[in-house]
Image: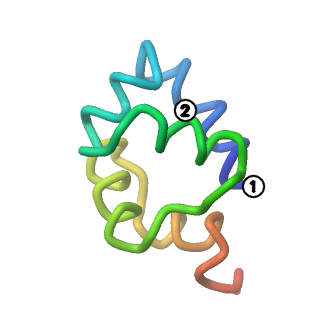
Amino acid sequence: MFTRWLDTLIPAAFETNAELARAVGVAESTILRWRRGEVIPSVPRLLKLSKATGTSTDLLLKIAGYEEPK
């Protein structure tokens, strides 16, 4: 679910993976690994991602698998 969210977000809000990486403060390769589903961002990175994208932290925690949907 998280990878689909990223695949939707990046074309809608950022021109490139590199642009999102700069906004979150990670390497572009990290964004690529997230998009491929190789790793899920840590909670601190999700907090930065939340701020950079204007997405609620609760939603990101849920779609990344840190919280069970209620």
Three-letter residue code for mark 2: Leu
Quadrant of the rendering where the C terminus is positioned: bottom right
Q: Name the colouring of the figure.
A: rainbow
Image quadrant in which you'd find residue 19:
top left
Badge 1 crowding class, 10 Å Cα cut-off, few under 14, some 14 to 19, many 20 or more, is few
Label 1 belongs to which residue? Answer: 1
At which x and y percent is residue 14? 41, 21
Q: Is residue 58 above or below residue 2?
A: below
Spatial separation of the CA atoms under disc 1 and disc 2: 12 Å
At which x and y percent is residue 53? 36, 42
Closer-to-camera residue (51/22): 22
Instruction: Specify whether 20 is left or right of 10.
Output: left
Q: Residue at x 41, y 62 (%)?
A: 46
Q: Is residue 63 above or below residue 21?
A: below
Q: Earlier in the sequence, mark 1 or mark 2?
A: 1
Please, which residue is most extreme toward the top here?
15
Badge 2 crowding class, 10 Å Cα cut-off, few under 14, some 14 to 19, many 20 or more, is some
- Asked which secondary structure carries label 1, the reply is loop
- Asked which secondary structure carries label 2, the reply is helix
Q: Residue at x 61, y 84 (%)?
A: 67
At which x and y percent is residue 1? 75, 55
Instruction: Specify whether 36 is left or right of 32.
Output: right
Three-letter residue code for mark 1: Met
Q: Residue at x 27, y 52 (%)?
A: 51
At which x and y percent is residue 5? 64, 44
Label 2 belongs to which residue? Answer: 9
What label does residue 63 carry, if any? none
Q: Is residue 7 above or below residue 24?
A: above
